[in-house]
Amino acid sequence: MKLNKEELQSLTDLNKEFVEKKVLLGDAVIVQGGLMQEVNVIRAKFAQEEQNLIKKYGADSVINLQSGEVTKNKPQENG
């Protein structure tokens, strides 16, 4: 018993498509890993910069990221 030409071609095409998608998925995972490393580096830099600014302006400071203006955080009143 043997597959006919169309059945074999269909199976071969599907298998090829499956393998291509697996490779693409693997590439995406590799890219994701690289991006996660970059995000972690940025987080660490941000945290360090934040600590530097806290030392300079105080922990209760609020920085407007658009204007650069630094103000003191006003405690909210309850009631």
Image (spheres, grey):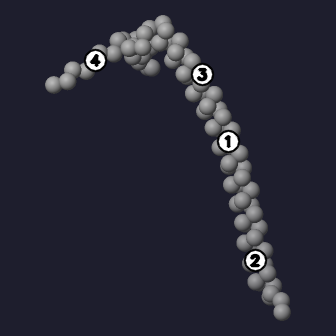
Callout 4: 10 Å neighbours few (<14), some, many (20+)? few
Secondary structure of the residue carrying numbered label 2: helix
Q: Residue at x 72, y 49 (%)?
A: 27
Q: Which residue is mark 2?
A: 11
SS label for mark 1: helix
In this view, the residue farthest toward the front is 78
Q: Position of residue 57 (x, y in %)?
A: 44, 8
Q: Residue at x 59, y 22 (%)?
A: 45
Judge from the rendering whether residue 21 lies leftward or rightward of residue 68; answer left or right: right
Type of amino acid at the residue the image marks with label 4: Pro
Above/below status of 55 relative to 29? above
* Residue at the spot of label 3: 45
Q: Earlier in the sequence, mark 4 or mark 3?
A: 3
User: Could you tell me if residue 69 is visible in this image?
Assistant: no
Query: The C terminus is located in which quarter?
Result: top left
Tag shown at residue 75 = 4
18 sits to left or right of 36 = right
